Amino acid sequence: MKKYRIIFMGSPEFAIPSLEGLYEKEEIIAVVTQPDKPKGRGLKPAPCPVKAWALSKNLRILDPPKIKNLEFINTLKSLKPDLIVVCAYGKILPKEILEIPKFGCWNIHASLLPKYRGASPINWAILEGEKETGITIMIMEEGLDTGPILLQKKITISKKDTAITLAQKLSFLGKEAILEAIDLHKKGLLKSTPQPEDGISYAPIIKKEDGFFTFEEPADLIERKVRAFLPWPVAHTYFKNKLLKVFSAEAVDLTHNKIPGTILEINKEGILVATSKNAILLKVVQLEGKKKMSAYEFACGKRLKKGDLFE
């Protein structure tokens, strides 16, 4: 069966399994990715993960600072792609690009559309307490993730999943989904379905303040924030006017009559703190200006004890 000529557009680690799968099965004629950005202590320009992978395979790389650049668009046209596959590229494609490929532009989106259209579907699915999510292969339009659905694959969100672990699972599911969609398309078996009008929700770009919590919130919400906002911005509160990041925590079903923020227990597992509903067990924390440590180490260092108010 004839290989499709594909332009792949993506940037982060999440996109690499899909790119790898397409590289093995189809013909990658170019990889479009974000320009190098300053990284590390020396702030030297460094390639994003997709660009680094493409370089290792000697693939043609295009990394325009502006996607509406006429020279860039003309270059894409000259390549005569059958398909443009987009996976976490980070920029919205203009109409001029959407119309270039023979079979259109397909997006590998990390949610079950129409739920969680937008930039951060994995984080918001965890934050909202969803039991499942998945991958949607969709035909791209000018609207934000509004295009017809070609294929969907579901996955369960475990109670232990963080945005990091769920992204890893979905990245490989994305590879499986895009390869299956292309295979069905070649056989004439792939059909598009308009997105339903019901159930539309959005997953906006995450801001640093989204990770803030207080013990006035219920324990299960605090736990979901901890899981949803790794590796950034990390769920955080304040301890004696200093930022305290929480990297691991667990909601505990516990009825109490204490003021939210009261320390209920301290042991090797961590610091158990009263919340507005139930309690939260803080396990791994990092105080501003200090290294990451177990909550038990933190409690010992600060000489915290049962009954203290966690301020």
Image: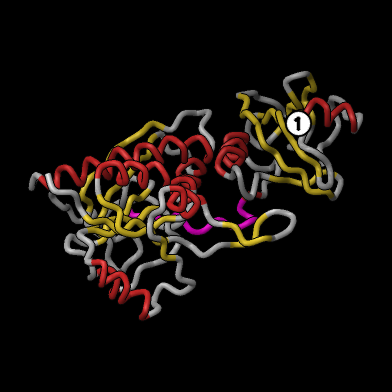
Where's residue 102, x and y in %?
17, 63
Q: Where is mark 1, residue-wise?
A: 258
Please report the residue visible at 78 percent of the width from the left and 19 percent of the height from the top: 267
- Vertical placement of residue 180 versus 200, above or below: above
Determine the image quadrant of residue 9. bottom left
Q: Relative to residue 95, is residue 162 depicted above or below?
A: above
Q: Quadrant of the C terminus?
A: top right
Residue 93 image point, x, y percent: 35, 68
The secondary structure making up most of the magenta span is loop
* Left or right, 252 with reference to 86: right
Number of marks in picture:
1
Residue most toward the bottom?
A: 70
**The residue tagged with tag 1: helix, strand or loop?**
loop
Its colouring scheme is secondary structure
Q: From the image, which quarter does the N terminus lie in? A: top left
Residue that appears at 20% across and 59% down:
82
Residue at image coords 48%, 62%: 34
Residue 21 in percent (x, y) is at 32, 41
Residue found 69% across the figure and 54% down from its top: 40
Query: Horizontal placement of 296 versus 100: left or right?
Result: right
Q: Nearer the viewer, residue 44 or 295?
A: 44
With respect to residue 125, does 95 lie above or below?
Answer: below
The stretch drawn in magenta includes residue 208: yes
Instruction: Give percent across and percent down for residue 300.
Output: 88, 26
Instruction: Please tell me which residue lies in front, 45 or 17.
Output: 45
- The quadrant holding residue 284 is top right
In this rendering, position of residue 48 left or right of residue 141: right
Label 1 is placed on what type of residue? Answer: Lys
Residue closest to the eye, 92 or 46: 46
Q: Measured along the vertical axis of the image, is residue 130 above or below residue 60? A: above
Q: Is residue 140 magenta?
A: no
Write the start and end of the magenta stretch as one range.
200-210
